[in-house]
Image: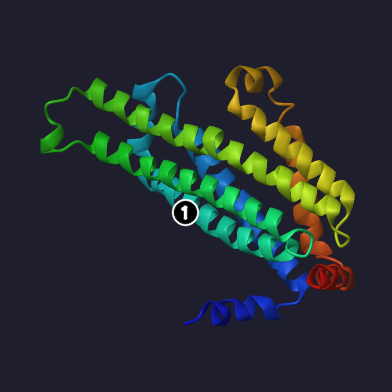
């Protein structure tokens, strides 16, 4: 199947419909991320206590596995969002829209690798003949290491890429004529807040204020996409102008 044949259904969608699908994808991305990384792991992981964490994992195995499933669903929805945003913002600046999509996809690849670490703790804690040489305390510590690697991949490495993506999307919204510019400014501020996670001492000092712009900016964009979509006439005008250039 040719590339043009695969992209034809996307090209045939109206800009407003694509925007609303993007809003749904964005909402699903956020809710599944919060469920897996915040709700599930927040209930299971006891900071600084490997033994309690291990006991929680073994006592709530189905819940723990659901965190991995939620991560995968979040990544899948986010890929859909990335494709739709690239298409929506091409008329503003094709090169910058492509750059934003590339940055986000790299971040999602990092998150995907981090999600694989969630497969390890349960297998380690359940033991087996090949792990019989290790003491229970060692296995619990190893499981905690895998959980920390997952957290670092999602909440530090990925968030830096996502922060860059938010800044680029914010700039594209500011340059667009089919979305409110205030949302673009809020998204850019959200991205800058997320990018502080690159330097842990600064992020710790600013927490939670560095995350507040993200809540406001992303919520505003999601709600606008779901309720209003985009101004289809203005989108077509900007697309036409970009085509002429």
Residue 16 lies in quadrant = bottom right
Residue 51 location, quadrant: top left
Q: Is residue 218 left or right of residue 119?
A: right
Q: Nearer the viewer, residue 75 or 65?
A: 75
Would residue 13 be found to the left or right of residue 127 on screen? right
When the figure is inspected, residue 122 is found, relative to residue 24, above or below; the finding is above
- Looking at the rendered structure, the number of numbered marks drawn on it comes to 1
- The picture places residue 43, in percent across and down from the top left corner, at 49, 34
Left or right: 6 as drawn, with respect to 167: left
Which residue is painted at 52% across and 48% down in the image? 106
Instruction: Check the image and report above or below for 225 versus 124.
Output: below
Residue 14 rendering spot, x and y as whole percentages: 76, 76
Residue at image point 25% right, 27% down = 139
List x then y, in percent, for residue 168: 72, 47
In this view of the protein, can residue 219 be seen by the observer? Answer: no
Asked whether 205 or 124 is in front, the reply is 205
- The secondary structure type at the circle numbered 1 is helix
Q: Badge 1, how many Cα within 10 Å: few under 14, some, many 20+?
A: many
Residue at horizontal 64 percent and vertical 75 percent from the top = 10
Q: Quadrant of the C terminus?
A: bottom right
Identify residue for label 1: 72
Colouring method of the image:
rainbow
Residue 112 visible to an observer of this rendering? yes
Vertical relation: 156 (above or below) 229: above
Q: Position of residue 140 (x, y in %)?
A: 30, 26
90 is higher (above) or lower (below) than 210:
below
Q: In percent of the image, x 69 and y 60: which residue is there?
A: 85
């Amino acid at each position: 199947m040719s590339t043009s044949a695969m992209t034809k259904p996307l090209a045939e969608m109206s800009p407003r419909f694509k925007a609303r699908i993007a809003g749904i994808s964005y909402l699903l991305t956020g809710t599944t991320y919060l469920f897996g990384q915040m709700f599930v792991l927040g209930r299971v992981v006891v900071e600084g206590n490997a033994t309690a964490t291990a006991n929680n994992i073994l006592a709530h195995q189905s819940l723990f596995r659901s965190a991995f499933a939620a991560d995968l669903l979040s990544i899948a929805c986010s890929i859909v969002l990335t494709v739709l945003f690239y298409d929506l913002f091409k008329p503003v600046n094709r090169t910058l829209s492509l750059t934003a999509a590339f940055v986000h996809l790299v971040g999602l690849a990092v998150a995907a690798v981090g999600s694989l670490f969630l497969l390890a703790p349960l297998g380690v804690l359940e033991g087996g003949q090949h792990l019989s040489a290790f003491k229970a305390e060692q296995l619990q510590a190893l499981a905690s290491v895998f959980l920390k690697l997952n957290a670092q991949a999602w909440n530090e490495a990925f968030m830096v890429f996502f922060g860059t993506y938010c800044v680029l999307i914010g700039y594209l919204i500011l340059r667009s004529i089919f979305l409110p510019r205030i949302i673009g400014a809020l998204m850019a501020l959200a991205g800058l807040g997320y990018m502080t996670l690159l330097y842990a001492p600064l992020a710790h000092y600013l927490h939670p204020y560095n995350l507040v712009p993200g809540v406001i900016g992303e919520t505003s964009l999601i709600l606008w996409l779901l309720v209003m979509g985009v101004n289809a006439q203005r989108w077509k005008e900007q697309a036409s102008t970009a085509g002429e250039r």
